[in-house]
Structures are given as C-alpha cells and as structure tokens.
Amino acid sequence: MNVMTSSPEAVTLSDKGLHVALTTGSSYFNYHWLRDNCPSSFDATTRERSFDIFHLEQAPRAEAARMERDVLIIDWAGEDHVTRMPVSWLEAYAQGRRRPDPADLPRRAWYGDHYADVARFTHAELLSDKARAKDWLEALIVEGISVVTGMPDSDEALTRLVNVMGQVRPTFFGDYFDVRTHINPTNTAYTAAALELHTDTPAEEHAPGVQFLHMRANTVEGGRNLFGDGVAAANDFRNMDPEGFRLLSTIDVPFYCEHDTYDMRSYQRVIELDQHGEVSGLTISQHMLDLIDLPQDLLDAYYPAFCRFGKLLQDDRYIMRFTLQAGECIVFDNHRIVHGRAAYSATSGNRYLRGCYADRAEMRSSYRALVSEGRFKA
Ligand SMILES: [Fe+2]
C-alpha cells in the first residue's frame, strides 16, 4: 500500500512521537518504538536486534521527518542517525495488535467417533518429506492428536520422530519413560490397573506440551487406550454450565507428585483458556490432585462443578476407545487431550510402551518455519 502523499505534510511531530498519514488514516507512533525498531537495529546475519536502546543518552526525539514514497525518513535529534522505516512495518503495527501468528490456528473439536479420522502418518514420510511434516504439525495444532505408523522397534525411532518437531523435553523423572508392570510401582501407570482420564505430570510448573507414546509390544488382553478431546468437553460444559465453567477456568487448584526423593507441586486451572478466551485445554488428574486448599465454603460451589465436569468428560460421546498396536506411536497435546487406559491382564502377554515429551512452543516454531517467511527470510 502507498501513503496518501509523499511530503513533509504527511508527518506531524509531537513531544513523544509522530503522526503519519497511512492509507488506513492518521496513525501515531512512539519515538522509542521508531528508534528501537529502525531496520538498521537488526543484524542481517544473526537476525537479532543489535541496537541497544538502553545506551541512548537521552530519550529519542525526531528532529525532522518526511515521507518518501513508501518510506518514513526520520532525522533523530542529538544523534547522527537517520531511520528509513518501510510503510509496511508502520501499517502492520499501527493498531497495537499482536503480530499475526501462522501457528495460531483455530482448534477443531472432535468426539468419540473420531478414531477413523485421526490424522495418520508413517514414520518414514515424516522423516523425509517436509510437506508431510507440516501436515503433521498442523494436525497436532488443530486437532491435538495424530497416529504415526510404521515405527521401527527401537529407542532411536522415537527420538528421530520427536526431532521432526524439536527436542525431547525431559520431565523430573527423566527424558523417557517405559510403561510396563513394575514390582514396586511408584506410579499407577506402572501397574496393570485401569488409568482414569488425565493429562500428564500436572504437578510440574509447566507440564510438558506434546506427549509421544510408542507401543513397542502389545499382546495382552485388555488395556484398551482411551483418548478424549478436552476442548470438545470444555466447550460443551461452557454452554451447559456457565458458572461451573467460570469456576474451573479461573480458580487454581493444587497438584502434587511425591515420593522418597521428590516433592513436586503446582497450582493449575482445570480448564485453560488461550489469549482469545477460547478453551485451549485441560489440566486434570485424579491421582495427582492434591488436597484442595481453597476456603471450604468456596468448595461448596467448586467441588460440585468439578464433579459435573469430570462426569461429562467421561461420557462416551467424547471418548475414543481403541488398542494401540505395536509399531504405532500416538502423539498428542498433553494440555488438551485426556488419556487413560483400561485395566489389562499382566500375565496374558507382553505390553511395553515407551514414551517421552516435546515442547509445544517448539512444535509451533517448527510449524511457522515450514509455512511462513518470518521477518528476515529473503
Ligand atoms: Fe499418562
């Protein structure tokens, strides 16, 4: 877009900033912002800001400014520096709105009948085809779940899959976890008992964002996998029980994970909202919910709402039930997708699940790099 005129009259200087005539109307820009974001402030090689505004001796102020075609030219007072600011940058920031984010995609809620439509990819194609990798990350952002098939039966196969989106993100119990029956279990997952629907490690300050479960062997009777979309359930809860939704999305409750050498604690909201006020997911885990330390009279309202939501979440309409086969890896958003497992018979065969996590921010970063130009790419 072009400015309305190419003349000094298009710019009006004031004490702390200037007004410039854009095609969208007159817009105000603060001098600190203009000086700090002068295109010369950024190093083309590192793509980082090389200018340090803290080193200016006095607050930046324009001596003179004018428009020349699509560039705002500013002569700075008390400084031997001229800024040439493209109008496209001014237009992008004139409204004070967040920079558009290609990874900020609307979520698509799914229900218990979704299994046949779950996005599926092969291990080989994700490692070799960037277009398929982009589709995979997009499915995880939009639906929060995917199945990767054709996984080689090795530890390395899982690591290489994670590396398509980022690094393995350790938790306080290590980089990877192996789920099979243990003699002295420290966790319900390491028994053959049923696992209620939950999100993982809620006691961490920042629970891991993306979970990988690689089924290496599965010949036992029972142990069907359960997966549900927390966004679908919480959106329905918002419509049918606005007050319950308000309580669960605004009040922090305590989670814990404690054994001989650790005592992890955090406070989380059961229903999480994003920057738009939309449901982004859940934090829920009956086996890691601490004694709720809220005022007891508040619990008169909170606990019934918590139970109403917990019952809704278990409703068949939300839950996919299937058996993850050896050679498959299910990848899902740990802040959105609740997962569980039916009990199984530990003596009926072999069941070995190896898992780990990755970071959601790193997943979005990889997605942006695949689909957009960024600010610095030529
Ligand atoms: Fe889990």
Image: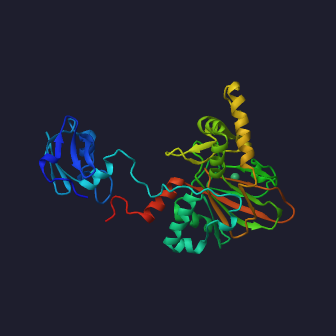
Query: Is the residue 224 above or below the residue 307 in the image?
Result: below
Residue at 68% across / 62% down in the picture? 114
* Colouring used for the render: rainbow
Residue at 69% across / 33% down in the picture? 302
Residue 260 in view: no
Q: Quadrant of residue 71?
A: bottom left
Q: Quadrant of residue 273?
A: top right
Residue 368 in view: yes
Quarter of the image where the N terminus is located: bottom left
Query: Is the residue 292 above or below the residue 327 in the image?
Result: above
Image position of 337 (left or right of 165)? right
In this rendered view, identify the residue nearer to me: 66 or 256: 66
How far across and down, in percent of the image, does residue 293 sit?
68, 29
Count the marks: 0
How far across and down, in percent of the image, does residue 236 sit?
65, 48
Query: Is the residue 33 above or below the residue 222 in the image?
Result: above
Image position of 310 (left or right of 13)? right
Residue at 17% across / 41% down in the picture? 12
How far across and down, in percent of the image, does residue 161 sit?
58, 66
Quarter of the image where the C terminus is located: bottom left
In this rendered view, identify the residue nearer to me: 72 or 312: 312
How far across and down, in percent of the image, does residue 366 sit?
48, 61
